[in-house]
Image: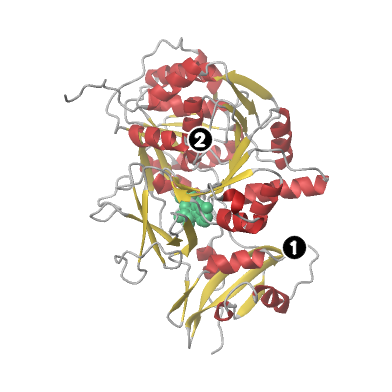
Amino acid sequence: MHRAMQDWSMRISHVIDHAAREAGVREIVTRWADGSETRTTWAGIRADALKMAQALKALGIRKGDRVASLAMNHSRHLVSWYGVAGMGGVLHTVNPRLFDDQLEYIVNHAEDRVLLYDAAFQPIVDRMKPRWPTVEHYVCYDSGAHGIAFEDWIATQDGDFTWVGGEETDPCMLCYTSGTTGNPKGVVYEHRSTVLHAVAGLQPSTFNFSPSTVMLPVVPMFHAASWGLPYAGAMAGIKFVFSAVNDPAVLHGLMLREGVTDSAGVPTVWLAHFQYCDREGIALPPLKAATIGGSAAPRFMIERLMKNGTRVQHAWGMTETSPIGTVGGPTCDWERLSFEERVAKTAMQGRPIFGVQLRTVDLDDMVTELPRDGVSSGALQIRGPWVIKRYFKAEEDAVNAQGWFDTGDVGILHPDGTLQLTDRTKDVIKSGGEWISSVELENAAMGHPDVAEAAAVGIYHPKWDERPVLFVVKKDGSQLSSADVIEHLKPLVAKWWLPDAVEFVDDIPHTATGKISKKDLRDRFSDYRLEA
Ligand code: ADP
């Protein structure tokens, strides 16, 4: 009775073959950096991916070799996702916002042999070329005066190519964490983990994709596999609209013109879109669904999107988890909840999608499992088939003996499975033996209409060990005082959580993925002292 079903290894080539066969006519639209637009289809993406695979082979690229991309979201980048994996290579998506030292480190560490890039990143390429000795070939996605142009390069091939087969556990993609401490670490995705993650992404409880979906993903294809959308989207045969620039005016225009139903991005992307609409005095685009992740989605953002009739899917994940771990969205009791209750629920990070398991453990001993009671807060750990086991070229596993990966996040699990993130392990503020969530303080502060951005940091205190200090960027022209901020916080947080000081700053440092960099903030204020 064993092995009665067909052998069908989970490889990415099946995904693009399916999309081309079953949704071959569905459009893939790209708005390029120069303002031009092109249209292709899933069948067109596959045809080009075959040519690209052939062109890579002609360059001598072999199975397992790394091919890097330094690019925004567009159809040629999508072709590369399938072309590289289809010829057995490993696509290393490089984040163009990394610092030069990090760019040098990761390309050398990955031993990239080919680098595909957008003309917009020509200055990075010119600067980094001497520091990237392993890169033998540079191909520019845009045509023009930039060396080999992608379209010309693949046009030298006829597409008569058979996808390279192999084990489903073969590597297909490589992405480095942005490395807030030490060097970035490489996360290698496998064909199998990628396919499973994408199947999970299709579920109604995840991205809710169907052939009627028209998605404009703002989440970049250069980081954390763009949340797996380019794979899940192919499986469901959705229409994609890509923009190689993240200008809200451009995104807004595309959303209206192309009938976009779904979009996904980090909170700053949505914020920029709100500001654009407010400036122009126009309505938000009529989206059916908005996925927000990467950092906590603030309440006002959720409220505004919900009032716009948009289903808000608040997602949590990390590069190490492919990245989707949890996603929120309406539950069967939704109709009975008040608007405020819906917002409060959506502001939490959602529920684990099938495939991954979560648990929280005691922050002091890191082993005692905590109850899922909606109160106990602890270190968040995850395991599952698309969760990292070992970083690229690392000597040791990144998980414990039971396979749990420690996320570095602190959270609460609720009885209905909902995850509520409260902080990063490194950022929780320990005051007199009790924990204060820096994130909750920040979120509460950001609810003040005159606060543009806020970051809470634990500063050494002679009596309490650490006390919170809140750094605030005011909105232009605001007369906000620290007393105003404290008054605003009083009804929102416990009295002993109130910051010992509110300091106004011109800017708050961010990481290459747009998150507040507490490390840089702490470095900047390393001489800051609180009185006993
Ligand atoms: P980096 O951007 O630092 O390279 P990731 O993109 O992997 O790393 O970021 C993962 C981290 O982002 C998580 O561990 C978590 O701290 C944070 N994060 C992701 N999604 C959310 C969310 N919805 N709410 C709060 N924090 C989030």
Mark 2 to mark 1: distance in Å? 34 Å
Q: Residue at x 38, y 35 (%)?
A: 196
Residue for badge 2? 229
| Image color mode | secondary structure
Q: Is mark 2 within 8 Å of ligand 1?
A: no
- Viewer-nearest of discs 2 and 1: 2
User: Which is more toward the observer, 450 or 137?
Assistant: 450
In this rendering, position of residue 473 left or right of residue 108? right
Judge whether 238 appears above or below 185 on screen. above
Q: Secondary structure at mark 1?
A: loop
Which amino acid type is shown beneath numbered disc 2? Leu
Residue for badge 1? 475
Q: Secondary structure at mark 2?
A: helix
For residue 410, the mark is: none
User: Which is more toward the observer, 391 or 272?
Assistant: 272
Judge whether 180 appears above or below 172 on screen. below
Specify whether residue 455 is in view: no
Judge whether 154 appears above or below 90 on screen. above
Looking at the picture, how far across and down is residue 122, in whole percent?
58, 36
Query: Which comes sooner in the sequence, label 2 or label 1?
Result: 2
Which amino acid type is shown beneath numbered disc 1? Lys
Judge whether 10 appears above or below 289 on screen. above
Looking at the picture, how far across and down is residue 201, in whole percent?
46, 37
Q: Residue at x 70, y 51 (%)?
A: 304
